[in-house]
Structure formats: structure tokens, C-alpha cells
Image (cartoon, rainbow, N blue to C red):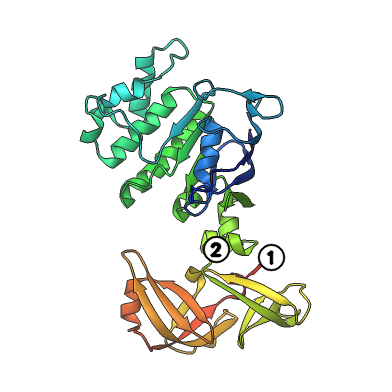
């Protein structure tokens, strides 16, 4: 198991590197470090790899101690046996793909470095790239070469820093499956940095949410996405609708609590907050259904009438801003916009299940 207690303060001139104060544990499988850009995820990887030195703390992998500020231990980066895949690949432009993979490769179990490299080339399906240089490779091929080069060093742990951010969607999907397969075959822990929800859910056996240099929640990816515990976590994982209201009443027989948010009444799961106390709730934009009609024979406890204020469209989704006394962000498809004939000033009804309303600490 990796156990990293890292305390690191950066110079104030670096606006993108907050002070790091974390306690990270990663067992087998793939552990995802999840958070927004600038949260400190890359700095955590760099400290584990030995690229930067913490101000205080202790970093160990099993019985191997990489850093211990109290004991005065700081193992050099090249001796830590850590595989590192950077976001921008960092391949040597003057070397072929095979030469890049062989760079730093260690012979193992009687096999030469070349044998090790060719085994990885075959594993990753990049046999046709061996004689090409990085500039002659596609983004997906470059990423596979970078993975193979990191694995060729026979690392004890793999650190991957947003390795798929520069590849297209279809290539990303294939690489996710390959990374998962490689982890299982290698048997070593992978620590994987991303801020992509799909990558986190498909790859992660466990997830650590980092915000402003601190760990704010840990657990299974789906558990965290579906039930963030605090407002910072909700914002990081994409609960775009966060409201502060007052507990109006409890319905023990129905298993719900009514929260009054500026006269917009929202049914949430039953909780123990006193009536009249403040409650913060979070709702993911994807958990809201839009209807043009007021439906009644449905299971959703919240049916809110509102007016569309704005419609924002991108390649893969459309976001509505719907005013129901308060503004809700709602994520739907462009096809739904067309079929429902939605436009600004349209009257709609928002359907929200009580269990989609998360009480935040």
C-alpha cells in the first residue's frame, strides 16, 4: 500500500499550486485522484515521484520508505522505481518508439531490455509504430508508447497525470480499457489523476477527491458522485445546484424532509436536522428531468414549475437555466431540446426525485 503524508507550501507567486496538506492511501487496483484544475493533484504525484520535496511528511510504499522528514530520508527520484506518465507524454523526439520504450528499461527474469520492450509493445498493440518517431505517431499511439516506457522500468507503482486529456473521445474509451487491463496484469497500484467523471467511474476502484490542496472525501467513485457529503465535494464532482434553505417540516411516514429555499419547497430524504435549522442541499444537473406538462402519476417527489431563462449548448450536451423561484441548472441532450421545442421563456416542469437531493455538511 502507498501511504503519503505530504505537507508542502509553494511560493505565493504560483497561483496554480495551492499549499498541499494531504494524507493519501492507495492499495491495489486503480486509485483516482479527482479534482478541478489547480487543486493540487499533480503536486501530490510529483512529491511521490521525488520531483519535488515536501516540507514535511512521510511517503512509503509497503516497506519501502521514499521520504521521511523526521528521519531525514529522501530517496532520489531515479531510485524510487516509480513509473510516471505525464499529461503531454514527454517522448524523446529524436528516438523511435521502440528506443523511447527501451530508455531506462530494466532486464527482468532473464530477459533483456529489448525483450521487455517488445513484450510491452505487443501488449499495447503498437507493433507498427516501433520504427516511427513521436511526431509520426497519433495522439493515442504516443500515449501507448508513454505507458510502455513507464512500465519498462519495472516500477513498484504507476503514476498517471491526466494521460488521456489530449486524445479524442473514441481513443480515450479504448485506452481506458487498456489501462485497466494493464493494471490487472501488472499487479501494481496505479494512482490516476483526472477531472473527467467518465474516466473516474470506469477506471477507479477507489477515489480521493482533492480540493485546494486537501483531501475532502474518499470512497468508491459512484458513491462519491451520487452522494457527496460536503459543499466543496459537491461542487468538485458536479452537483451544479447547491442551495441553502431552512428545514420546514419532516414527514417520517413518507421518509422525506421539506426544505424551503426562498419559497421554493424541495423534498429531500428524511434527516434529523431540527425544524427551522439551516440546510445545504445539492442536486446534480443530470438528475433533473424536464417535462412540458404537469405530470402527476409519477414517483418524483418534486415537480417544480418554472421558466427557461437561458439555453447553453456544446458538442455533447445542452444546459438549461430554469427559474422556479430559484435558478436550476439542468443538463439534457440537444435532441430533447428539439423534441420538446424548448426555447427561452418556455414554461417547463422539473421532476426531481427526493433521493437525488443530497444533504451537504
* Structural distance between the alpha carbons of marks 2 and 1: 13 Å
**Which sits in the foreground, 186 or 234?**
234
Which corner quadrant of the image does residue 354 belong to?
bottom right
Quick check: can you spot residue 130? yes
**Which residue is painted at 39% across and 19% down in the image?**
116
Position above or below: 33 against 319 = above
**Helix, strand or loop status at disc 1:** loop
- The answer to which of marks 2 and 1 sits earlier in the sequence is 2
**Helix, strand or loop status at disc 2:** helix
Left or right of residue 63: residue 234: left
Mark on residue 152? none
Q: Residues within 10 Å of mark 2 (few under 14, many from 20)?
A: some
Image quarter where the N terminus lies is top right
Q: Residues within 10 Å of mark 1 (few under 14, many from 20)?
A: few
List the residue tagged with mark 1. 361
**Which residue is painted at 69% across and 80% down in the image?**
246
Image quarter where the C terminus lies is bottom right
Where in the figure is residue 106, as x and y percent of width and height?
A: 44, 16
Position above or below: 245 against 2 = below
Quick check: can you spot residue 255? no
List the residue tagged with mark 2. 235
Position above or below: 73 against 11 = above
Where in the figure is residue 160, as x and y percent of width and height?
A: 46, 38
**Which residue is painted at 31% across and 64% down in the image?**
315
Which corner quadrant of the image does residue 135 belong to?
top left
Amino acid at each position: 500500500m502507498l501511504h503519503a503524508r505530504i505537507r508542502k507550501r509553494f511560493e505565493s507567486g504560483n497561483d496554480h499550486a495551492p499549499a498541499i496538506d494531504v494524507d493519501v492511501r492507495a492499495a491495489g487496483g486503480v486509485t483516482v485522484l479527482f479534482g478541478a484544475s489547480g487543486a493540487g493533484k499533480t503536486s501530490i504525484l510529483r512529491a511521490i515521484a521525488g520531483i519535488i520535496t515536501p516540507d514535511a511528511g512521510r511517503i512509503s510504499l509497503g516497506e519501502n520508505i521514499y521520504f521521511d522528514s523526521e528521519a531525514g530520508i529522501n530517496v532520489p527520484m531515479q531510485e524510487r522505481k516509480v513509473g510516471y506518465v505525464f499529461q503531454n507524454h514527454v517522448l524523446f523526439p529524436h528516438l523511435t518508439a521502440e528506443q523511447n520504450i527501451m530508455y531506462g528499461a530494466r532486464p527482468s527474469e532473464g530477459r533483456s531490455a529489448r525483450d521487455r520492450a517488445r513484450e510491452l509493445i505487443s501488449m499495447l498493440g503498437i507493433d507498427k509504430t516501433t520504427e516511427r518517431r513521436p511526431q509520426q505517431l497519433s495522439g493515442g499511439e504516443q500515449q501507448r508508447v508513454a505507458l510502455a516506457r513507464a512500465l519498462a522500468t519495472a516500477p513498484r507503482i504507476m503514476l498517471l497525470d491526466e494521460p488521456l486529456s489530449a486524445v479524442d473521445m473514441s481513443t480515450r474509451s479504448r485506452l481506458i480499457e487498456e489501462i485497466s487491463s494493464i493494471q490487472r496484469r501488472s499487479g501494481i497500484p496505479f494512482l490516476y489523476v483526472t477531472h473527467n467523471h467518465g474516466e473516474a467511474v470506469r477506471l477507479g476502484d477507489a477515489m480521493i477527491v482533492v480540493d485546494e490542496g486537501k483531501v475532502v472525501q474518499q470512497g468508491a467513485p459512484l458513491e462519491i458522485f451520487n452522494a457527496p457529503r460536503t459543499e466543496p465535494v459537491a461542487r468538485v464532482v458536479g452537483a451544479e445546484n447547491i442551495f441553502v434553505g431552512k428545514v420546514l417540516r419532516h414527514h417520517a411516514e413518507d421518509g422525506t424532509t421539506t426544505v424551503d429555499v426562498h419559497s421554493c419547497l424541495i423534498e429531500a430524504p428524511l434527516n434529523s436536522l431540527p425544524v427551522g435549522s439551516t440546510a445545504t442541499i445539492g442536486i446534480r444537473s443530470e438528475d433533473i428531468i424536464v417535462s412540458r406538462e404537469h405530470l402527476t402519476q409519477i414517483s418524483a417527489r418534486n415537480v417544480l414549475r418554472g421558466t427557461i431563462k437561458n439555453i447553453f449548448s456544446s458538442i455533447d450536451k445542452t444546459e438549461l437555466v430554469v427559474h422556479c423561484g430559484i435558478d436550476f441548472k439542468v443538463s439534457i441532450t440537444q435532441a430533447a431540446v428539439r423534441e420538446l421545442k424548448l426555447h427561452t421563456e418556455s414554461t417547463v416542469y422539473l421532476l426531481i426525485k427526493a433521493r437525488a437531493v443530497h444533504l451537504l455538511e
